[in-house]
Amino acid sequence: DQQVKQNSPSLSVQEGRISILNCDYTNSMFDYFLWYKKYPAEGPTFLISISSIKDKNEDGRFTVFLNKSAKHLSLHIVPSQPGDSAVYFCAASGGGSQGNLIFGKGTKLSVKP
Amino acid sequence: DTGVSQDPRHKITKRGQNVTFRCDPISEHNRLYWYRQTLGQGPEFLTYFQNEAQLEKSRLLSDRFSAERPKGSFSTLEIQRTEQGDSAMYLCASSPGPNYGYTFGSGTRLTVV
């Protein structure tokens, strides 16, 4: 039973355009959400997070939106750059997970020059 | 502090052999996590420590797996009688506490032949 779902395994975007990565979750008790980026042969690196008391958090080119009623969050990257090409993981904690992060399967983003 | 270190980066072993991996977390982080990642999947939680206490173990952690964090600093993950299904990337992460983003190491890639 997957509690965090990333339904798009891959996404291709032109350089300079917006990338939108989506994530759905099933556990309404999750209260903290994060996005990680992973390059091949490296561990995931933290990108941005959002608490359930907010609906938006911004950090430079990266913005995360949280829609609690829909149990949905999204990561927007504007403008997209070729160096953003990586696998992006959505993760959530809370709801009995004791602070342990539950990850989605990831979305592979390719940004074409 | 250079972040979370994992050793070795790669390990090839024959089926039935025992292997041990080491993780050195960020020194001021009291939480240490082990995750496993296979191709096409997100990181899956295995176990975590708060200081030297192992507080939770996933059902993925069969009795062939054991983890220790003897002095609340570095941790080891041992797999006994390895099986081909154990082939994966083993990721270690640390955090200052719950609801903080993890810092991951680069992982240990295990191949069981």
Image: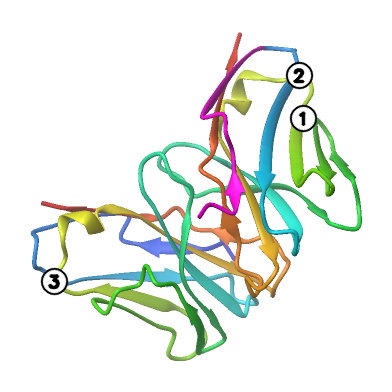
Question: What segment is highlighted magenta in the picture?
Answer: A1-14
Q: The residue under label 2 is which amino acid type?
A: Ile
Marks 1 and 2 on same chain:
yes
Secondary structure, mark 3, is: loop
The answer to whether tags 1 and 3 share a subunit is: no
Image mark for residue B81: 3
Task: Say whether residue A42 is left or right of residue B110.
Answer: right
Residue under pointer 2: A18
**Position of residue A2 measured from the top left corner of the image (x, y, whole percent):** 53, 52
Q: Is residue B2 magenta?
A: no
A78 shown above or below B72: above
Counting other residues with Cα less than 10 Å from the Cα at mark 1, is it few (<14), some (14-19), or many (20 or more)?
some
Query: Type of residue at label 1?
Result: His
Examine the rendered structure and indicate whether residue A81 appears above or below residue A107: above
C-beta proximity under 8 Å, tags 1 and 3? no
Image quadrant in which the C terminus of chain A is located:
top right
Quarter residue A62 falls in: top right
Chain of the residue under label 1: A
Residue located at (63% from left, 52% from top): A91
Which x, y percent locates residue A70? 79, 43
Which of the labelled discs sits on residue A76, or is there none?
Answer: 1
Q: CA distance from mark 1 to mark 2?
A: 7 Å
Coloration mode:
rainbow
Residue pictured at 73% horizontal, 67% vertical: B99
Q: Could you say where residue A93 lies in the image, as x and y percent from the top left?
A: 68, 63
Q: What chain letter is assigned to the residue under label 3?
A: B
Q: Nearer the viewer, residue A28 or A84?
A: A28
The answer to whether the residue labelled 1 contacts the one labelled 2, judged by CB atoms less than 8 Å apart, is yes
Mark 1 element type = strand
Marks 2,3: beta carbons within 8 A: no
Q: What's the residue type where badge 3 is placed? A: Arg
